[in-house]
Amino acid sequence: MKISASFLGASNIGSTLRRLNVTSVDYIHVDVMDGKYVKNKSLSLSELKEIPDYTRKRLDVHLMVQSPLKMIDTFATLNVEYLTVHIDIKDNLDKIFERCKLYGIKVGLAVNPKDDISIVFPYLDKIDLVLIMSVEPGLPGQEFIKTSLTKINRLKEEIKNRGLNTLISVDGGITLDNVKYLRDVDIIVSGSTITKSPDFEETITKLRC
């Protein structure tokens, strides 16, 4: 299992990223919000471009925006490994997939708590990752939605039956108490559990165990 650390809600982003940079965390999870797809708005593009000044970790970007296609060129200049968009956006998904592949960026689709996991099945052979939202998107500090476990199992079975290599990532409300239920997923996204702990590395190690 790999760990993607989110800094959403961190009081000092630069300091948090510097501390994460010297840990064993696999990715920095970057939440991008436009104030339209979700109510909140996050860092501007100019601020996002500053992230490599603080960390050399690969970025796992989660676009909670209505029109992500126009943003992909900007992210291509950053150290992005995964770029995930939501399945119910306005832009054409195939065009997004093509643009990401053009830049060598792996692409993911996010599924919200209200969505049936089967909504992503037609795209599994076109994408690299499915991000299961285990909280409502856009707000940090929410509790893990337990029905997400059923989604994980159904998705895992579908991927296995079709002989695909699509990864499963889970984002939201993951703690040291409930991470034991997520041992079969490929990536977990953890925010405040890591960033509000006194020892980032110790917490990351415990999340892996």
Image: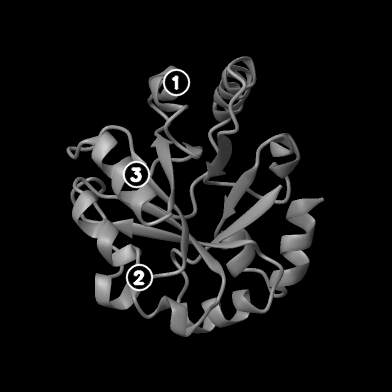
Q: Residues within 10 Å of mark 3 (few under 14, many from 20)?
A: many
Q: Give the crowd class for mark 1: few <14, some 14-19, many >=20 residues within 10 Å.
A: few
Question: Residue, x 39% and y 33% (percent of image)?
Answer: 112
Q: Does label 3 or label 2 sit earlier along the sequence? A: 2
Name the kind of residue labelled 1 in the image: Phe
- Which residue is at the front of the view, 54 or 106? 106
Discs 1/2, front:
2
Q: Which disc, if any, is residue 121?
A: 1
Judged from the image, the secondary structure of the residue bearing numbered disc 1 is: helix
How far is the residue under mark 1 from the one under mark 2?
Answer: 30 Å
Decide if residue 136 is on the left or right side of residue 148: left
Q: Are marks 1 and 2 in contact (CB under 8 Å)?
A: no
Using residue 58 as the reference point, say whether residue 139 is left or right of it.
left
- Which of the two discs, 3 and 1, labels the residue nearer the N terminus? 3
- Work out whether residue 159 or residue 66 is closer to the camera in this orientation and state it: 159
Q: Residue at x 25, y 49 (%)?
A: 65
Rendering coords of residue 92 (x, y %): 21, 36
Q: Which residue carries the number 2 mark?
A: 77
Looking at the image, which residue is at 55% across and 59% down?
Answer: 191
Q: Percent from the top left, x then y, of residue 41? A: 25, 61
Q: Position of residue 116 (x, y in %)?
A: 42, 19
Q: What is the C-alpha distance between the residues marked 3 and 2?
A: 18 Å
Is mark 3 in CB contact (under 8 Å) with mark 1?
no
Residue at 18% in and 49% down: 36
Where is 162 relative to 130, above or below? above
* Residue type indicated by callout 2: Thr
- The secondary structure type at the circle numbered 2 is loop
* Viewer can see residue 12: no
**Numbered badge on residue 85:** 3
Q: Is residue 9 above or below residue 164?
A: below
